[in-house]
Amino acid sequence: MDKPIENLIQNLQKQKKKIISSDDLKKFIYLTFWESTPISKIYKITFQLRNRWFLFPLRKDLFYITNPEKPIIAEEIEEQRYRKLLKDHCNWVCKQRYIWGLTALEIHLHWNGVTIPETVMIINKEKQAIETVVFEKQIAFKKFETKWKNLISQLIKQTNEVNMPNCKNLLIANLELSILECLYNFDTTNKWYIEECIKKAIKKNWKTLNLQNLETIIKLWKHNTSLNRLHSLTKLTYPSLSEEIKKLIKKYGFIL
């Protein structure tokens, strides 16, 4: 092994079990070789480090610094690092955002036991794109706005801050907003599961469901359809709640 590569590996090994971006890796290479190292050589060196298991790719621009003598278990890395990577990536993309819909509802129902989703939807005002968090796990960034105003600053008031394993202070849609978002953004391929989550949430919380939150949301001219669906869903089992929801619809929206 030539001396520069050996020095690079020694420097990397001091950072074992840490995550390094492709940009920071370039800085390591520049310091070890020279600042004018051509990009083709940087790619070649990166490939060598990956091939010798000193680097383990988490996504195209992110690596886990490894010890080649110890086996890598991707599931463990994902469980330990996903939530922190999710938050860091969101911080880099947008300041105002929250987790919405089904993922938010699952967190309300299961808290720390929620399974890491294949895709998590992030409402924000900066970006509309699908990007990778780690391995095959993705973020779907959705810009939430109307033709006449951006609603994110109002919807952000309808969120809760939660702490999860390896990640603190995640903003998620509150229970009322997450239920309405699930009812509006109805995924027909996952319909049965979504309905069961909504029914479970209502059964557990129907006495304490915050009608003021529902009122605030429909006053934003959002989720009239969802509130109608919630009215129908609660009509037989929870008639008193259903009647209160109907009053809100008549006052601020329209019956479908």
Image: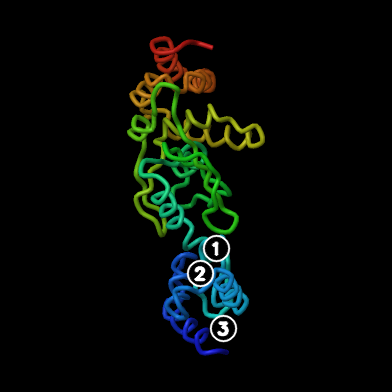
- Report the residue marked by disc 2: 64
Please state if 166 lies on the left or on the right of 44 as rendered.
Answer: left
Q: Do the residues labelled 2 and 1 touch (CB within 8 Å)?
A: yes
Please state if 193 lies on the left or on the right of 227 as rendered.
Answer: right
**Cα distance between the residues tagged 3 and 1:** 19 Å
Q: Which of marks 3 and 2 is nearer the N terminus?
A: 2
**Cα distance between the residues tagged 2 and 1:** 7 Å
Q: Residue at x 53, y 28 (%)?
A: 183
Amino acid carrying label 1: it is Leu
Above or below, 222 relative to 83: above
Above or below, 197 relative to 114: above
Q: Do the residues labelled 3 and 1 touch (CB within 8 Å)?
A: no
Q: Position of residue 100 (x, y in %)?
A: 46, 38
Q: Where is residue 12 in the image (x, y as percent from the top left)?
A: 46, 78
Residue situated in front as seen by the camera: 213 or 121? 121
Q: Position of residue 9 (x, y in %)?
A: 49, 82
- Local crowd size for mark 2, using a 10 Å CA cut-off: few (<14), some (14–19), many (≥20): many
Residue situated in front as seen by the camera: 183 or 147? 147
- Report the residue marked by disc 1: 58
Amino acid carrying label 3: it is Glu
Q: Which of marks 3 and 1 is in front?
A: 1
The answer to which quarter of the image holds residue 16 is bottom left
